[in-house]
Amino acid sequence: MSIIQAKHLRGTHPGNPFKEFSFTLPEGVIMGVLSDNPEQNTQFISYFLGLSSFSAEYFSIFGHHRPEKAAERMGVVLKDSGFPCHFTPKQISTFGGHMYENWAAERIKFLCHQFKIPLKFTLNTLNQQQKWLVSLSFALSHNPDLLVVDVPLDSFSSDEQKEILHILQNFVENAKRSILITATNPACFGNIPTHYTLLQDNSILVSGNATVFLSNMGKFTLEANESVQIPPEFPVHFKNMINTTEYFVLDRNFFIEKFPQQPLEPVTLEEVFQWITKEESND
Amino acid sequence: MTKRRISILLYKEFLTSCCVFRRYLLLLLVYFSFGVLGIVDLLVVLLLTLITPFMTVYSLFYQDDETNFLYFSSLFPQGKVLVPLARYLYTCFLVLPFALFSLIFLLFAGDFTPYTTEELLYVCIGLLCCGFFLSAILFPLTYFLGSSRSKPWFCLLILGSFSLFILFRQVFFLQIAENQVTFLWVSTLELSVAALLLFLLSLLLFLLSLLLSIRILEKKSFIPGK
């Protein structure tokens, strides 16, 4: 079963930079959304939250065709906490209690206590990270089935990061729940996501189980005097170094079929991310 | 559940507007003192009293923009409908105490003003109509453009309504006072009926404006970084 299913989704608002894409978020997974541009990440997730208008051949989130209908089942942590700055976590808890059917006031109190956030302090007395932690506590307190986290995780201290990742891991212990979490650096995730969506130039480069798509990728290096004739439409990226050229192959099977004599080395997620953020593309 | 959601959104509106209340109430006290002492015309004091709730609600848009509440509230269940609904309801609730306060003031104003209580009452109704009418235009515009981009329109409309108020005072009000009303639509109607119709019309416009605001918010895309 999938929580989100989108086929040929295309943003319809003016100035929309994102290209048409298809996307699936299965149940019980942590999906890391990676790109070098945080706005690109936000734009991507905004379609599933109903914040950006779109048209799609098929769209479903928790069985609803409009994201607004699934609001009760989604917990969202965005860069802006959204609450007025003179609100206290206690007032936010009261707010949540009236807004959501499955509100657990004890949970937000417990999480704020865990994050060492005083319940009676107004938001404007807290730093940005503490505000995000309040938002995370709020998002987790109405018992959502999908948690969407779009905050820069690398701005937290390593202890806070560990604590957040631990909470997220506990969250998906229930196999019906999933997490969509964004970052501009794969190191922030630790090793918790099993699935990734890599974004490049406002489109999805690859999305799915990391083990599966990494096994389908590869790389090879050629000396300056060697060459391989690669057609321009071929899914290969390359990077020129001093005496060598490193090639990054998106579709291993297709490549081996065309160039059986060229051995391929395995790649890691960090290498793929470096490729998509720094490389010169041959297309 | 919808009632619970509306009630908490109204509470949020109240908490947010508390910050500006103190400033406005202090200013009103100053104006009332000036009005009683005869330094400022009582009509101006009435204008400032009845325009205060509308100004207070309009200032909420700025505070929402600061925290991106509009962006955030769209994620709540029924958020795109309930958030504007709460704002329009709050405007109506906020107008009531100010109108009541003006009414009480009018009962005691006879000694300090050349106008009769009945005349001042008509001015009050006119001002309330004006407030609802201006809000009916400004609120959807602000939902559409955002608070900072709608500011020139706000200034234009306020200046326009002030000019109208002066015109109203100079021409219409003095004619009422002398029983020389020559406007066609008033001459055929009782003044009280005309005032009531005008008030109902402004409320109807306000309601239509709510529907427009909801529609705008439902269609609105929140573009990251803008």
Image (cartoon, coloured by chain):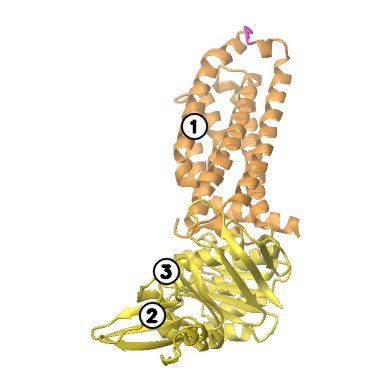
Chain colours: A yellow, B orange
Label 1 packing within 10 angstroms: few (<14), some (14-19), many (20+): some
Q: Quadrant of residue A224?
A: bottom left
User: In what element is the residue under mark 3?
Assistant: loop
Q: Amino acid at mark 3?
A: Asn
- Mark 1 falls within which chain? B
Q: Amino acid at mark 2?
A: Gln
- Mark 3 falls within which chain? A
Residues drawn in magenta: B179-183
Image coordinates for residue B205, horizontal then vertical, percent: 66, 33
Q: Which residue is mark 1?
A: B158
Query: In the visual, does A42 lie left or right of B193?
Result: left
Image coordinates for residue A89, horizontal then vertical, percent: 57, 69
Q: Which residue is mark 2?
A: A274
In this rendering, the label closer to the viewer, 2 or 3: 2
Please tell me whether residue B182 belongs to the stretch shown in magenta.
Answer: yes
Estimate the spatial distance between the alpha carbons at disc 2 and disc 1, rounded to whole Å.
Answer: 55 Å
Q: Which residue is mark 3?
A: A37
Is residue A175 or residue A250 the one in the foreground?
A250
Sequence-wise, which precedes: disc 2 or disc 3?
Answer: 3
Estimate the spatial distance between the alpha carbons at disc 3 and disc 1, rounded to whole Å.
Answer: 42 Å
Q: Main secondary structure of the magenta part?
A: loop
Please tell me whether residue A116 belongs to the stretch shown in magenta.
Answer: no
Do the residues bearing badges 3 and 1 touch, measured as CB atoms within 8 Å? no
Q: Is residue A102 above or below residue B164?
A: below
Image coordinates for residue A142, horizontal then vertical, percent: 67, 72
User: In what element is the residue under mark 1?
Assistant: helix
Q: Name the residue at the left extreme.
A: A242
Q: Quadrant of residue A68?
A: bottom right
In this rendering, the label closer to the viewer, 3 or 1: 3
> The N terminus of chain B is located in which quarter?
bottom right
Q: Are marks 2 and 1 on the same chain?
A: no
Q: Amino acid at mark 1?
A: Ile
